[in-house]
Image (cartoon, rainbow, N blue to C red):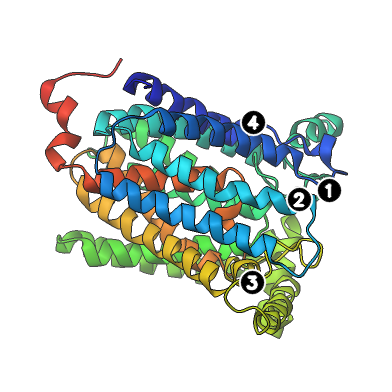
């Protein structure tokens, strides 16, 4: 049995590994198998699987059983869909079999740890802050006029050449939209950290740092030139304003939020021409997509039109195998952008219900966990609310891409679900255990 200290050290190591280990796109770009992605997913999956397997005692055993049987059923269903598919089975179809194992292992690995506020700050938030800084640096570095060979050497570790040539930020992700969507968390984390600081002069230095980091997160999202990330971000901002207005019991805070919203709207109205010109010059790919939507309608926007074609194809195919689907079937249809149509085609209505349950549950459990730790610790509260806002954006973002299937995001998503679930099930007094005893974690 692995002791608690070692588990917590592994939490830090795996979070940093998950977000920083290269996928070596410049080496494996011609490969039909995502070799780099296998490395990124395989190590956390094996380590977390072994740790969970060696754990002899489980708190909240009923919850553990439900989590295990849900993912075990999902694994069986993927196997059935794969084995009974009428389509040709490729080697890279087998890659999909690891997903339920990775998801379940990451979830249970987080769940078996006895979390309190101090442990969350030291072993989850601190390493994630390092990750955020790394992602910000790589996001803004791509637009800097640095040596071309150096730029291709650095970013070639993580993404394909076309993204580097178009100056589309990807951070450590293979695709710009994955990176842009992930950056919603640090944006709100720094925004909320700024808002929670009290005192005008006492915390002035921290406030300036948070404002700068917040701006850099926003700029990083813009540099991705991803319409999906852009729409998800604005939806998140709108949700945050509504959420803070509805949940705040203080009239003064409600009025402040209304004022902030009005100021934001006025800034957008008065600066729309100059902003549009700036985006057109610096981010032509993003500008062309937005312009097409506004002038010709969303159905004429190329990427959206492609998703509509995929949707029609999936619905037509679904008539033949509505329950079981066609398995991964990458020989027939390797790329299906939307999360919902992807699962409908591959795993039928049953698979579709499974992914809906996961997405809805993430929104629910992230809200419950945030409410549980509210007013306990401002740092943890800011992080949990940022994660909740991110989870709320997933149902909308999933119409654009299968984000929670992507490397780096998938491990983090299921790991953080495990943390959130454990927090909800842990008595509030236990969460403050170390704080009460005056014991720090070394």
Callout in the foreground (2, 4): 2
Callout in the foreground (3, 4): 3
Q: Which residue is under mark 4? A: 21
Total tally of numbered discs in the picture: 4
Q: Residues within 10 Å of mark 3 (few under 14, many from 20)?
A: many
Q: Which residue is under mark 2? A: 92
Q: CA distance from mark 2 to mark 4?
A: 21 Å
Callout in the foreground (1, 2): 2
Q: Residues within 10 Å of mark 4 (few under 14, many from 20)?
A: some
Tell whether 87 sits left or right of 349.
right
Could you tell me which residue is drawn at 49 percent across and 35 percent down? 49
Q: Which residue is under mark 3? A: 325
Tell whether 399 sits left or right of 117.
right
Residue 333's quadrant in the figure?
bottom right
**Is the Cβ of the residue at disc 1 closer than 8 Å to that at disc 4?**
no
Callout in the foreground (1, 4): 1
Q: Which residue is under mark 1? A: 32
User: How far across and how far down the image is residue 169, in percent?
Assistant: 68, 46
Q: CA distance from mark 3 to mark 1?
A: 23 Å
Label whose residue precedes the other's in the sequence (1 or 2) = 1
Q: CA distance from mark 1 to mark 4?
A: 20 Å
Q: Residues within 10 Å of mark 1 (few under 14, many from 20)?
A: few
Asked if residue 55 is positioned above or below residue 106 in the image, the reply reads: above
Could you tell me which residue is drawn at 46 percent across and 62 percent down? 393
Which type of secondary structure does the marked residue at label 1 adopt? loop
Residue 242's quadrant in the figure?
bottom left
């Amino acid at each position: 049995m692995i002791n608690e200290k070692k588990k917590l050290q592994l939490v830090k190591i795996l979070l940093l590994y998950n977000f920083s280990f290269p996928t070596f796109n410049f080496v494996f770009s011609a490969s039909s198998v995502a070799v780099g992605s296998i490395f990124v997913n395989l190590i956390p999956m094996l380590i977390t699987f072994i740790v969970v397997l060696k754990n002899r005692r489980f708190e909240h055993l009923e919850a553990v059983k439900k989590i295990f049987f849900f993912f075990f059923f999902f694994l069986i269903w993927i196997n059935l869909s794969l084995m009974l598919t009428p389509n040709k089975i490729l080697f890279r179809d087998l890659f999909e079999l690891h997903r339920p194992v990775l998801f379940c292992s990451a979830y249970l690995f987080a769940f078996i740890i006895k979390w309190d506020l101090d442990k969350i700050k030291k072993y989850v938030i601190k390493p994630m802050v390092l990750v955020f800084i790394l992602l910000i640096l790589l996001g803004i570095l791509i637009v800097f006029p640095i040596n071309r060979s150096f730029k291709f050497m650095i970013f070639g570790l993580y993404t394909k050449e076309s993204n580097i040539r178009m100056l589309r930020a990807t951070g450590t992700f293979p695709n710009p939209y994955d990176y842009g969507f992930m950056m919603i968390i640090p944006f709100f984390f720094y925004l909320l950290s700024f808002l929670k600081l009290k005192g005008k002069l006492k915390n002035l230095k921290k406030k300036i740092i948070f404002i700068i980091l917040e701006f850099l997160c926003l700029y990083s999202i813009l540099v991705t030139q991803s319409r999906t990330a852009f729409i998800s971000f604005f939806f998140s901002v709108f949700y945050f304003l509504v959420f803070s207005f509805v949940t705040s019991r203080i009239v003064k805070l409600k009025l402040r939020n209304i004022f902030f919203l009005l100021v934001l709207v006025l800034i957008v109205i008065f600066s729309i021409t100059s902003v549009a010109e700036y985006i057109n010059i610096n981010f032509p790919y993003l500008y062309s997509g937005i312009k097409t939507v506004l002038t010709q309608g969303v159905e004429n926007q190329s990427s959206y039109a492609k998703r509509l074609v995929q949707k029609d194809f999936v619905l037509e195919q679904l008539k033949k195998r509505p329950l079981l689907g066609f398995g991964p079937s990458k020989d027939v249809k390797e790329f299906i952008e939307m999360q919902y149509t992807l699962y409908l085609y591959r795993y039928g209505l049953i698979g579709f219900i499974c992914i809906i349950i996961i997405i809805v549950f993430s929104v629910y459990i992230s809200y419950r966990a945030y409410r549980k730790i509210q007013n306990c610790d401002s740092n943890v509260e800011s992080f949990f609310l940022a994660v909740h806002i991110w989870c709320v954006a997933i149902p909308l973002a999933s119409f654009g891409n299968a984000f929670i299937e992507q490397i780096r995001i998938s491990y983090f998503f299921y790991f953080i679900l495990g943390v959130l679930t454990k927090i909800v099930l842990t008595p509030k007094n236990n969460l403050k255990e170390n704080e009460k005893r005056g014991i720090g974690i070394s």
